[in-house]
């Protein structure tokens, strides 16, 4: 027998507030520990400056136009690479996943290409495009594509066969079955892939800028490191982490909106 339990809105808000408080306490504890370690001599300030000095350097960066230009370059490369990967992975995932023979034909190729780390493609990207933004896009698209594509394949394979057969009996064509049967089943997987791909895309964007030297926060970190400005390096790393948090919050908000009909978002447990 299937039993349905519904979480009240007050309980959901209370759980969310508790998680936020615990998260804030964790961040505060990390900052206190970071400030204390160089102060008490447990770490050399030359390599681990106190959190207060890093915060001051970051505040100075926030007033710099060059900093926001670097943030814009990073976000532009990340968004463009993720958009290309999302479009390619969604289209190919639905087409190949809906054709079992084509999926079987391509499985070995996918399993060969997917484990190749994107950083291994850095020499190829430099050879093809130099320090141009296309080098960064090559790495970002490659890394994010597999995260989304594999999730779409899982989503298409998870379609209820009874629903599929019922749609066929009612005479729905291939496109109509994808629209009304496959798409609702695969959408949660697609959004999970987008969330995973967004995080990986940001990591690869900063890595490419750091190693290749294309404009962005990664390049700023490389310049600060080569100049021996350790405090600036830490400040830029903190800024990169904050950017990652904002990206994750934004993608989760998009996921909740796209899946507002889904039980996992509505707070219902079946």
Image (cartoon, rainbow, N blue to C red):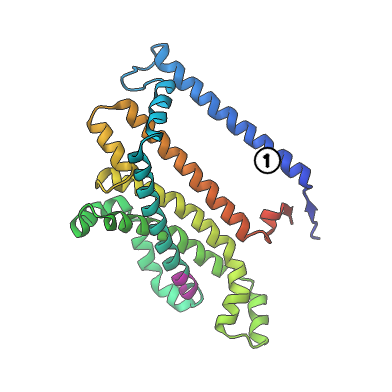
The residue that appears at 50% across and 58% down in the rendered structure is: 193
The image quarter in which residue 16 lies: top right
Q: Position of residue 9 (x, y in %)?
A: 77, 47
Q: Which residues are magenta?
A: 91-96
Q: Which class describes the residues within 10 Å of circle 1: few (<14), some (14-19), or many (20+)?
A: few
Question: What secondary structure is found at the residue carrying circle 1?
Answer: helix
Determine whether, in the image, residue 224 is placed left or right of residue 148: left
Q: Which residue is mark 1?
A: 16
Q: Position of residue 113 (x, y in %)?
A: 34, 61
Q: Position of residue 38 (x, y in %)?
A: 39, 16
- Quadrant, the N terminus: bottom right
Nearest to the observer: residue 139 or residue 97: 139
The residue that appears at 27% across and 56% down in the rendered structure is: 135
The residue that appears at 25% across and 36% down in the rendered structure is: 223
The image quarter in which residue 136 lies: bottom left
Q: Position of residue 105 (x, y in %)?
A: 40, 75
Magenta stretch: includes residue 43: no
Furthest-left residue in this view:
127
């Amino acid at each position: 027998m299937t039993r349905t339990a519904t979480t009240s809105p007050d309980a959901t808000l209370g759980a969310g507030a508790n998680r936020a408080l615990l998260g804030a306490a964790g961040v505060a504890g990390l900052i206190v520990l970071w400030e204390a370690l160089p102060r008490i001599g447990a770490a050399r300030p030359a390599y681990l400056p106190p959190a207060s000095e890093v915060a001051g350097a970051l505040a100075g960066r926030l007033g710099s136009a060059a900093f926001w230009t670097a943030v814009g370059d990073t976000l532009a490369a990340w968004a463009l690479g993720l958009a290309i990967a999302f479009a390619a992975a969604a289209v190919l995932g639905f087409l190949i996943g809906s054709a079992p023979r084509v999926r079987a034909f391509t499985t070995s190729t996918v399993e060969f290409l997917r484990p190749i780390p994107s950083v291994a493609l850095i020499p190829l990207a430099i050879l093809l495009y130099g320090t141009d933004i296309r080098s960064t896009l090559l790495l970002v698209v490659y890394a994010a594509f597999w995260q989304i594509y594999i999730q779409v394949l899982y989503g298409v394979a998870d379609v209820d066969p009874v629903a599929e057969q019922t749609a066929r009996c009612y005479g729905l064509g291939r496109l109509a079955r994808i629209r009304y049967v496959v798409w609702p089943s695969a959408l949660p997987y697609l959004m999970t892939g987008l969330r995973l791909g967004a995080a990986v895309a940001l990591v690869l964007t900063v890595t490419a800028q750091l190693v290749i030297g294309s404009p962005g926060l990664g390049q700023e970190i490389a310049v600060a490191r080569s100049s021996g400005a350790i405090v600036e390096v830490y400040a830029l790393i903190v800024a990169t982490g904050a950017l990652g948090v904002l990206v994750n919050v934004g993608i989760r908000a998009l996921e909740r909106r796209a899946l507002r009909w889904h039980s996992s978002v509505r707070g219902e447990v079946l």
